[in-house]
């Protein structure tokens, strides 16, 4: 656990340390990029419009589960398993079980890769959030089954007589086979059971609530995937800091204007544990950090 999660909080806690050091001494009017009392002043990251051009069906669904706070959405058919993918002029399409709405849904891979969202770094969590926002707008406008023609995403119905999925708006067939569905379903159920077992162990061992335990594991997996590609880059750390802000409730404004004690107290309350447990057990044993 420590090897997976140890780097997650480094950038956030470094910012906390910098804030506490600078707030305790005299201030300086140093310019951005300079130093004040031995503390380097760094320009805060800025948001911009981004896309996730390398998003996959799996990463998209994983992030849907994260932003929906559920673990029950999963991929039913990948792009190479749908008829529509092989239709001339069509995108690559995959089919998911969308647990948030309780329905099957076909989604264009090219469409989700082109969705723009406003954030510090490219990440599929923000992509999933923007997708949910687009869905909500479509539903509000009366398009209950996806975009009007089913060109980007659409609800699909399962027909037991043909063992296939059919687009409600487009009328396209999305092929399925019993074996493929069963294998994907069993794999999803097995992964879900394993995840809950790990989250329960983390919740018990480190005295945090289950949502926090699940979020820690999800972020830990994200870090593990990043580390598989090499050392964490500055961009990776900024992206993780954004995730940690969601997890702890600590904002950039908090880091700039509140004391370390106030920040730690807020983080403990959001995580669902005590300040002493956060400082004496969770941080040192999980993240390898002593305040």
Image: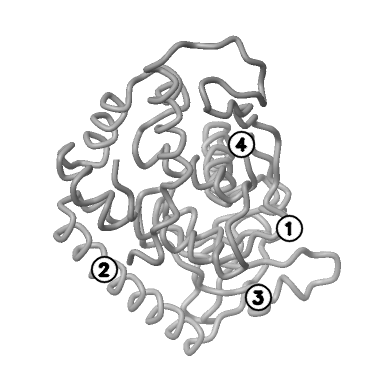
* Helix, strand or loop status at disc 2: helix
Crowdedness of circle 4 by 10 Å Cα count: few (<14), some, many (20+)?
some
For disc 1, the marked residue is 110
For disc 4, the marked residue is 119
For disc 2, the marked residue is 198
Q: CA distance from mark 4 to mark 2?
A: 30 Å
Nearest to N terminus: mark 4 or mark 1: 1
**Residue at figure coordinates x 66%, y 63% from the top left:** 171
* Helix, strand or loop status at disc 1: helix
Looking at the image, do the residues carrying marks 4 and 3 touch, with CB atoms under 8 Å apart?
Answer: no
Specify the quadrant that holds the C terminus: top left
Q: CA distance from mark 3 to mark 1?
A: 15 Å
Q: CA distance from mark 2 to mark 1?
A: 34 Å
Q: 31 or 38: which is nearer to us? A: 38
In the picture, the disc for residue 244 is: none
Q: In the rendered view, would you say 83 is above or below 282?
A: below
- Residue 130 in picture, x, y percent from top left: 58, 40
């Amino acid at each position: 656990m420590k090897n997976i999660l140890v780097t997650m909080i480094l950038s956030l806690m470094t910012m906390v340390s910098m804030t506490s050091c600078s707030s305790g001494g005299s201030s300086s009017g140093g310019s951005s990029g300079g130093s004040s009392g031995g503390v380097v002043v760094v320009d805060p990251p800025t948001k911009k419009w981004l896309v996730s051009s390398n998003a996959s069906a799996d990463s998209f669904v994983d992030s849907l589960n994260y932003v929906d706070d559920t673990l029950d959405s999963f991929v039913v058919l990948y792009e190479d398993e749908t008829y529509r993918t092989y239709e001339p002029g069509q995108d690559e399409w995959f089919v998911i079980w969308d647990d948030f709405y309780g329905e099957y849904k076909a989604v264009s891979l090219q469409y989700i890769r082109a969705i723009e969202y406003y954030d510090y770094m490219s990440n599929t969590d923000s992509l999933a959030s923007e997708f949910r926002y687009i869905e909500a707008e479509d539903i509000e406008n009366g398009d209950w089954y996806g975009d009007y023609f089913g060109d980007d995403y659409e609800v699909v119905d399962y027909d037991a007589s043909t063992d296939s999925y059919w687009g409600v708006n487009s009328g396209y067939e999305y092929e399925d086979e019993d074996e493929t569905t069963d294998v994907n379903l069993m794999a999803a159920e097995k992964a879900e059971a394993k995840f809950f077992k790990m989250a329960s162990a983390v919740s018990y061992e480190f005295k945090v609530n289950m949502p926090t335990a699940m979020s820690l594991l999800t972020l830990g997996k994200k870090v593990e995937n990043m580390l598989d590609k090499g050392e964490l880059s500055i961009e990776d750390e900024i992206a993780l800091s954004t995730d940690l802000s969601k997890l702890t409730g600590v904002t950039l404004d908090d880091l700039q204007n509140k004391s370390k004690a106030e920040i730690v107290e807020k983080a403990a309350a959001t995580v669902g544990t005590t300040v002493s447990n956060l400082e004496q057990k969770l941080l040192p044993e999980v993240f390898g950090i002593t305040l």
